[in-house]
Image (cartoon, helix red, strand yellow):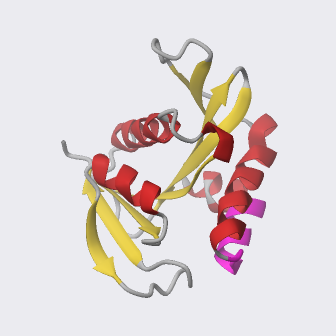
Amino acid sequence: MRAYGLQSYPRVRIITYNAAYRSAFISLNREWIEKYFEIEEADVAQLERLEETILGVGGEIFFVLENDHAVGTCAMVPHGPTGCFELAKMAVAPEMRGKGYGDLLMDAAISWGKSQGGNEVMLLSNTILESAIKLYRKHQFEVVRLGNHPDYKRSNIEMKRSLDS
């Protein structure tokens, strides 16, 4: 487990995967998926078998902890060509949104991707998630594909960003 220091957030820290927060990864993601969409087979694989489908393939899971309570999470999963990661399963508890925790997760995930020798991050989302799309654009993600995606029924946008900068 690695902690990322946050001087301006004294009770907040970002950590890499710790099994003590496994259930938070599942519940935070189920909350937003079930609110807007439906749980798909690929979701079940990543949520219920995260040790195999994320960590076991060289990925990482990040948590935002506020007073040692997990209030946000995301994963980075090796994807496609060497050096490409998928930003996946990003979620912040509804009552914690608007505090900049998505930015903290994004910064930690991008930093980690660079430290792993990555050169690109991609993500799949849906345009109805306006706040998420705004966050991705803020962090230099650009749209590379609009329309249905074969991996998720709910996905109608694919975005990428370089890790070279």
The quarter holding residue 56 reads bottom right
Q: Residue at x 56, y 48 (%)?
A: 74
The residue shown at (33%, 44%) is 117
Q: Nearer the viewer, residue 7 or 57?
A: 7
The residue depicted at 73 percent of the width and 23 percent of the height is 68
Q: Is residue 47 magenta?
A: yes
Q: Is 22 or 13 nearer to us in this picture?
A: 13
Q: Quadrant of residue 127?
A: bottom left
Q: Is residue 138 magenta?
A: no
Does 98 sit left or right of 81 as displayed? Answer: right
Identify the image quadrant of the N terminus.
top right
- Write the residue at 72% across / 69% down: 34
Can residue 86 be seen in the rendering of this structure?
no
x%, y% of residue 91?
Answer: 60, 51
Residue 57, given in percent of the width and then of the height, sits at: 57, 58
Q: Main secondary structure of the magenta part?
A: helix
Query: Taking 50 as reference, is 9 above or below it?
Result: above
Q: Which residues are magenta?
A: 38-49
Q: Is residue 58 visible?
A: yes
Indicate the quadrant containing the C terminus: top left, top right, bottom left or bottom right. Answer: top left
Rendered view: 103 above or below 41:
above
Toward the viewer: 58 or 34?
34
Name above or below for residue 128 compared with residue 116.
Answer: below
Q: Position of residue 65 (x, y in %)?
A: 65, 28
Camera-side residue: 96 or 119?
Answer: 96
